[in-house]
Image (tube, grey):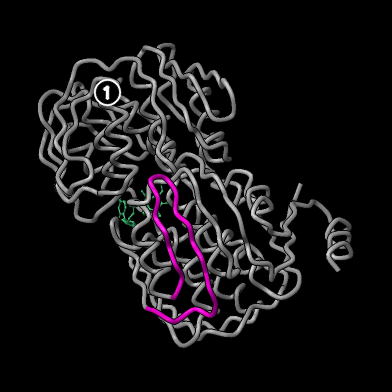
Amino acid sequence: MEQYYVIKGGIPLIGEVEIGGAKNAALAILAAAIMTDETVTIENLPDVRDINVLLDAMQGIGAKIDRLDEHTVKINGSLIQELRVEYECIKRIRASYYLLGALLGKYNHAEVALPGGCDIGSRPIDLHLKGFRALGADVTIKHGLIVAQAERLFGTHIYLDKVSVGATINIMMAAAMAEGKTIIENAAKEPHVVDVANFLNSMGANIRGAGTDVIRIFGVQKLHATEYSIIPDQIEAGTFMFAAAATKGDVTVKNVIPKHLEATSAKLVEVGCQVHEMDDAVRVISPGPMRHTQVTTLAYPGFPTDMQPQMSVLLGIAQGTSTVTESIFENRFRYVDELARMGANIKVESSIAIINGVPNYMGARVSAPDLRAGAALVIAGLAAEGVTVVDNIHYVERGYEQFEKKLCGIGAQIEKVSSEKEIQKFKLKVG
Ligand code: UD1
């Protein structure tokens, strides 16, 4: 059933919102949890579609999944029979590739369908495979499946040609039980790389240097049970911070690690917002018209590509001309045409969006082209004059838990509806 968000814009968001666990950390941690035969408990799990699809795929190969509540799961990988993860299970989530590293690390054998996920440009996994090969695995692609196998995996020295979150994590998992020492150079430094390393270490792995660009993994023979709580989602937090800014609101975003939000906070200050950091919260106050600026997406600690569409939406209603340069993915401006329907004046030239600020957006019917761009269009709708309808919200639900409810909690007028009739009803209600 197709569902839509309907939004009456122009209301400053005010209040407090709680952030959930990091989706991208959780995806890797869930996969890594099957690397022991003992039971692992994971807390602060976000209850979003990508997570539930991965859990289904894990159950499909024989892992025991016990959902204690929507944010806690117990996983036992001792009864895994099947080392093949079929396309049907995982075509909707790219991060299914983490099962490759986890299964290969534990059983020296994995077969996983080539991943799907958001269409934000060509997303190769050559670096993951290069890492597995360097550890001694034979890797081939047969009938849409990646098949990786080895007699044994051996520690080695791997230089990543590009900084890749996925490759860093996948190699770290595969190397956790390899014989000897593995060194990953030019590793990604994202908070979720650190979280996955901490998780593996809590299971008995010996990984050092996560969070720097050189990670050392000393292989161990066995991993054991653990209880682990996932870090807060920096992108969910950033999205609410930008929603506060775009609506000229005053929102305290709670249960975050402010250090992980530094690049996001810095840009908000540059455009004229106030950002107050507390121990585990940030408060964003947006006093009035915002100023233009320049942004380039970069690997952590740079400005995250997953906040790029939200940034463009904000700059679309800031004074003057801004530029947003996308340096990670080549096809991440597909939302610009949708935003133009709301009155934005944005021109894209290869990887740069040139944004001429307009006074405000006008409500329109728009379609979410991917997860983060979908969230960005919701922000535009919250700022806009009049009513906005966002289609294809299944993308947004891949990564945001109770998005509309959390927004309502800070004063937004937004509903999730499933028919034209309900859209009309909402319009009549809000006037
Ligand atoms: C992860 C995040 C995604 C985020 C991205 C960058 C998950 C599930 N997804 O994606 O939300 O936008 O990090 O922060 O955690 N590359 C290669 N070869 C490879 C792997 C990557 O060329 O084998 C390139 C990619 O095309 C891209 C760049 O490296 O240009 C970075 O990609 P990567 O960090 O791997 O992104 P993901 O792990 O897929």
Q: Which residues are magenta?
A: 272-293
> Which residue corresponds to the image point at 19% horizontal and 55% vertical from the top-left?
161
Kind of element beneath mark 1: loop
Q: Name the foreground residue: 138 vs 89.
A: 89
Q: Is residue 209 left or right of residue 21?
A: left
> Which residue corresponds to the image point at 75% horizontal and 54% vertical from the top-left?
415
> How many residues crowd mark 1 within 10 Å: few (<14), some (14–19), many (20+)?
many
User: According to the image, label 1 marks what residue?
Assistant: 108
- Magenta stretch holds residue 219: no
Q: Name the foreground residue: 17 vs 366.
A: 17
In the image, residue 121 above or below residue 91: below
Q: Name the foreground residue: 134 vs 44.
A: 44
Quarter occupied by residue 139:
top left
- Magenta stretch holds residue 273: yes
In the image, residue 335 above or below residue 31: below
Q: Is mark 1 within 8 Å of ligand 1?
A: no
Q: Quadrant of the C terminus?
A: bottom right
Tell me how many marks there are: 1
Where's residue 172, x and y in %?
24, 35
Q: Is residue 41 left or right of residue 15?
A: left
> Which residue corresponds to the image point at 39% horizontal and 26% vertical from the top-left?
228
Where's residue 44, x and y in %?
48, 32
What amino acid is at disc 1?
Asn
> Which residue corresponds to the image point at 60% horizontal and 54% vertical from the top-left?
15
Where's residue 255, x and y in %?
46, 43
Quarter occupied by residue 180:
top left
Q: Name the foreground residue: 260 vs 90.
A: 260
Q: Is residue 128 left or right of residue 178?
A: right
Where's residue 376, x and y in %?
56, 63
In the image, residue 400 above or below residue 247: above
